[in-house]
Amino acid sequence: MASNDRVRVRGLSIYRPIIYGNTSVVLTQEEREALGSPDHTHRWTVAVRSAASAPNSDIVGGADDLSYFIKRVTFKLHDTYPNPTRNIDKPPFEVTETGWGEFEIQIRITFVPESGEKAVTIYHHLKLHPWSAVGSGEPEIPPLEAAMKMGPVHSWQYDEIVFNDPFQSFLNILLAHPPTPLPRTKRRPVPFHTANPASLEASKGGVPEFTQAMEKEEAERLENARKQVIAEQDRWREKLIEKEHELERLRKQIGPS
Ligand code: SLL
């Protein structure tokens, strides 16, 4: 190891895109009978993967092997599962299970020792039931028959793991493994997210894929929301001034108290 390997490269930030989340399918009657847990209705996979998908792959993300910077992913399942803490020490960093209920999964990502980085913990709400139109009353759970026809449920979150002032040796490792870039534009359905309810339709019809366009669109949605908030503030400020004037007029009408 060169003597400067444990030197931090100050002022430099480097990131790696990841996705985390789950895919879930309804079990057929035969699958349920074969299981020995007749109350289990779904098979699901929770995973941490590269954001880019491999060409023609039927999984979300996962084009790149992330083990050059991730040493272990620990998935902490609901206590109703045997050995709920699942350590995954090699790719794919995922757990496949069957079950009947949704719950919060704690995901702890431990980095390779060369990184000198602390582990990070993220949370994912396991999603089994199909997304329904958001904002139109109570979200409803369709009957299993209907859900089965709707196909697999995908619930994935894009994120970027940022390393600030990385050690030179770790930086070398990262630079030797550039992430596969996301496709610029949509080739497949988009991953649905509640932050963008309008994407529900665009998420239907196959295995979704993250794109660069999604980031641009999110930036635009944020910018539009910012403009809307400013316009609302201006409107309410004017209203307040108007009411203060009215109050003053009325006070004058009453005369000195
Ligand atoms: C619920 N709060 O009530 C959640 C808990 C737990 C789901 C969901 C495993 C079952 C097993 C399973 O599906 N647990 O292996 O017995 O909806």
Image (cartoon, grey):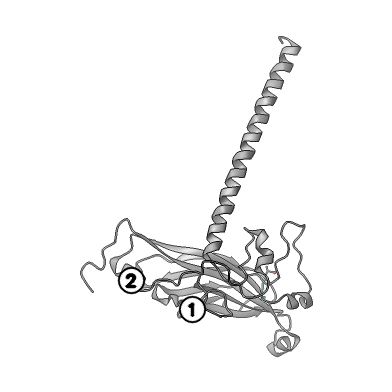
Residue sitting at 46 percent across and 69 percent down? 181
Examine the image and state in which quarter residue 20 appears: bottom right
Mark on residue 114? 2
Residue sitting at 51 percent across and 76 percent down? 62
Looking at the image, the residue that sits furthest to the left is 3
Q: Are marks 1 and 2 in contact (CB under 8 Å)?
A: no
Q: 204 or 19, which lies in front?
A: 204
* Left or right, residue 97 beside residue 11: right
* Left or right, residue 87 beside residue 199: left
Examine the image and state in which quarter residue 136 appears: bottom right
Q: Is residue 9 above or below residue 177?
A: above
Label 2 environment density (alpha carbons within 10 Å; few <14, some 14–19, many ≥20):
some
Look at the image and tell me in which quarter the C terminus lies.
top right
Q: 228 or 23, which lies in front?
A: 228
Mark on residue 20? none
Picture coordinates of residue 154, whole percent (x, y): 63, 71
Label 1 environment density (alpha carbons within 10 Å; few <14, some 14–19, many ≥20):
some
Mark on residue 88? 1
Picture coordinates of residue 195, whole percent (x, y): 62, 58
* Left or right, residue 194 beside residue 5: right
**Kind of residue at disc 2:** Glu
